[in-house]
Amino acid sequence: MRENLVLQVLLVIIVVLHLSRRPAEGVRWLALAKMSWLGSLSEEDGCDRLAGLVKRQKRLCRRNVELMDSVKTGALMSIDECQAQFQNRRWNCSTTDSNRLFGRVILKQETRESAFVHAISSAGVGYAVTRACSSGQLRKCGCDRTVRGRSKDGFEWSGCSDNIAYGSAFSTAFVDARERGQRRKNSSRALMNLHNNQAGRKAIEDNMQVECKCHGVSGSCEMRTCWRAMPTFRRVGQLLKEKFDGATEVKSAIRGTRLVLMPLNPQFKPHTEQDLVYMESSPDFCEPDPKLGSLGTHGRVCNKTSKAIDGCDLLCCGRGYMTRKVKLVERCRCKFHWCCVVKCKQCERIIDEHVCA
Ligand SMILES: *[C@@H]1O[C@H](CO)[C@@H](O)[C@H](O)[C@H]1NC(C)=O
Ligand SMILES: *[C@@H]1O[C@H](CO)[C@@H](O)[C@H](O)[C@H]1NC(C)=O
Ligand SMILES: *[C@@H]1O[C@H](CO)[C@@H](O)[C@H](O)[C@H]1NC(C)=O
């Protein structure tokens, strides 16, 4: 009897240990977005007070205190961009008050939405760190000085090229940290998160632009100097939203001794490094479910004429909608006065607004 009990207790302990090591909540570090005192993080032990970080991330924080403000900026930028891209969808990327920021559907499930949040936030950190490097205010990194010499298009590489290699490398080290330790644990969710994190960084790396300045007599462009610059973060958000729309549903499979992700439907072409992948279909997000992270769509403004997801039919989940009059105040009848002011009147317009029942 006694031995039996000991055995059972041991079993429970093993199960609990196993569960606690599951690669859940890959984006818990986004909680940094809420920490107002982060800017004053200077003394090294401050890193241990940061909620939502795993050991490896705290270690990186201690070694790179000067980058932590950029990590926070990256978190804020990515949440803003997520909300902009999803403003007309049932799930609109709204965050919760708790410091977990997102509900189960992002933190613990393997949905498209979770794929997007992983990708945009890992892109956000890469972006913000790269920008901080270019600002010239960091000790550890600066502009990319490997972009040098004369290009074949006849211009001179010069100026400050964005050091995306550095930003991406830091994002990989920091954002992937929670899953990295789990990779050996052979978990398909860790693989999924790592893939989507990488796809987010790719959206910047693969879309670097060339920006130039002209030199020469009176504004002619006899000489040009150019540098490599990141796309706008809005562009990165758009690219990833397109990847969200075309995301591939995958399953895990064993190849040799390695766990890999492959399309659920073998007739589909395999996903590329740039694509987002998911393993679980999303809930419909029609009704509020705080644990899930769904606010429901009651009271949301919808578009009466649209047949897409922002239209009243789909957004309101077939419950119907109400119409109310709202007053719109606009600048109007603007006149140009010589020289140089524009004066406008304020006009009021009454419009119909439709909201989900
Ligand atoms: C992953 O797990 C499978 C069984 O689920 C096993 O056959 C394989 O050897 C494991 N691979 C590694 C690298 O642990
Ligand atoms: C998202 O929708 C909820 C209602 O479901 C609304 O209260 C909230 O303001 C919206 N958030 C954003 C960022 O649009
Ligand atoms: C509503 O949807 C229609 C059709 O998609 C579109 O032309 C229109 O601009 C939308 N209106 C608003 C206010 O977004």
Image (cartoon, rainbow, N blue to C red):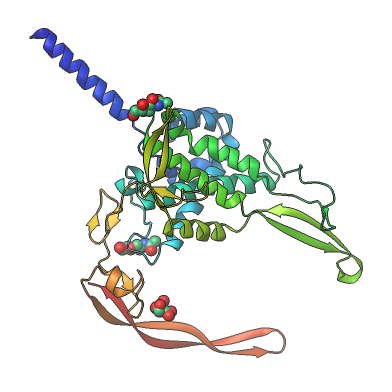
In the visual, does 336 lie left or right of 108? right
> Is there any visible trace of residue 36 in the rendered image?
no
Quadrant the N terminus occupies: top left
Rendered position, 7 above or below 130: above
Measured as percent of width and height from the top left, residue 56 is found at 48, 29
In the visual, does 285 lie left or right of 221? left
Rendered position, 271 above or below 299: above
Q: Residue furthest left?
A: 1
> Is there any visible trace of residue 296 in the rendered image?
yes
Quadrant the C terminus occupies: bottom left
Residue 286 quadrant: bottom left
Measured as percent of width and height from the top left, residue 7 is found at 17, 13
Residue at the (59%, 51%) spot, across then down: 204
Measured as percent of width and height from the top left, residue 348 is found at 42, 87
Q: Count up the numbered dots.
A: 0
Ligand 1 located in image quadrant: top left
Q: Residue furthest front?
A: 267
Residue 29 or residue 167, whichever sits in front: 167
Residue at the (72%, 57%) spot, across then down: 210
Measured as percent of width and height from the top left, residue 350 is found at 37, 87
